[in-house]
Image (spheres, grey):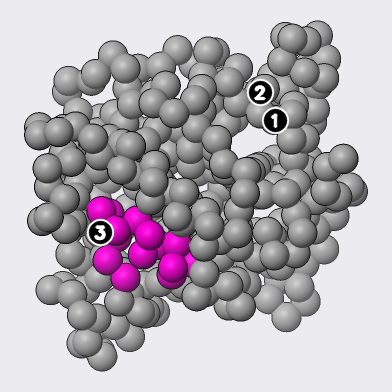
Amino acid sequence: MLPARRLLLVHAHPDDESIGTGATMARYAAEGALVTLVTCTQGELGEIIPPGLAHLAPEHDDTLGPHRAGELADAMAQLKVTDHRYLGGPGRYRDSGMVWGADGRRAVAPDQIDPRSFWAADMLEAADQLVAVIREVRPQVLVTYDEHGGYGHPDHIQAHRVATYAHALASVRSYRADLGPAWQVAKVYWTATPRQLMQEALTVAHERGDSGFEHVATADDFGYVVDQADVDAVVDGTEYLDAKMAAMRAHATQIDVQWPYFALSDRVGQPLWAQEHFRLAFGQRGPVDPATGYESDLFAGVSP
């Protein structure tokens, strides 16, 4: 027997889920929904913040992936999410790495790609791995990134592509019956960061001048913000903010949290929010909150 509400999230690396959707995951898990997280890689090429863990890097022990798997398990315990899988199994797809593009705001794939990397994966093979999950847990709602993968990381783009392809294939009755009975996901959302909200938060940060980090980001640092008008849903996770921050802190190799900011390896402070924003990419928009004009529930308008 499956719970009445079922949410599937597809993220690229350990830590992505906590930064972008941690409060949403904690909220729905607490409300009794089945929250399933699929992580596409173990993040083997992530940049390491604590100097004492530098030996985990690929150029040394190359054990960052298993270490980050442990961090992810700790983060899921904080969010009370009990259903987590790696796409194709742990280590099936390796972190592809990234470099910054000419504008310095969007990531791009490096010139040399490991053939084991997610960016080099066969699209149909990877999608079939996710089709099996979709048909097993039968989610009404799927969450992933937009077509740019947010800030352009090749693994984020690939996660978007695989999730989009798998969503289409999973609903075809005659496609791969060995992967389970066909299932139509009712709504697909892309994570989003509104430009206006980011600008307001950064203005406050610069005025306060006490982020705890060497620098505070400016709006020009972000190539992934979207217009406020493009946002369809805002999930209020205020009650679960502590759980989100605890989950982010569990990813100690990647994130430094100093409320109300966090920083990655670049040591640039960014705002940390309890409200998480989404764009509806597939399905019918449900009833909106009259006070905001947004859906306040990703399951709005969805039948069990």
Residue at x 77% of width, y 43% of height:
140
Percent of width and height locating residue 49: 18, 56
Quadrant position of residue 148: top left
Q: Amino acid at mark 2?
A: Val
Quadrant position of residue 218: bottom left
- Residue segment shown in magenta: 244-257
**SS at mark 3 in the image:** loop
The dot on residue 131 is 2
Q: Residue at label 1? A: 134
Q: Residue at label 3? A: 264
Identify the image quadrant of the N terminus: top right
Tag 1–tag 3 contact (CB < 8 Å): no
Residue 181 visible in image? yes
Tag 2–tag 3 contact (CB < 8 Å): no
In the foreground, 295 or 174: 174
Percent of width and height locating residue 257: 32, 70
> Within 10 Å of the Cα at label 1, are there few (<14), some (14-19), or many (20+) other Cα atoms?
many
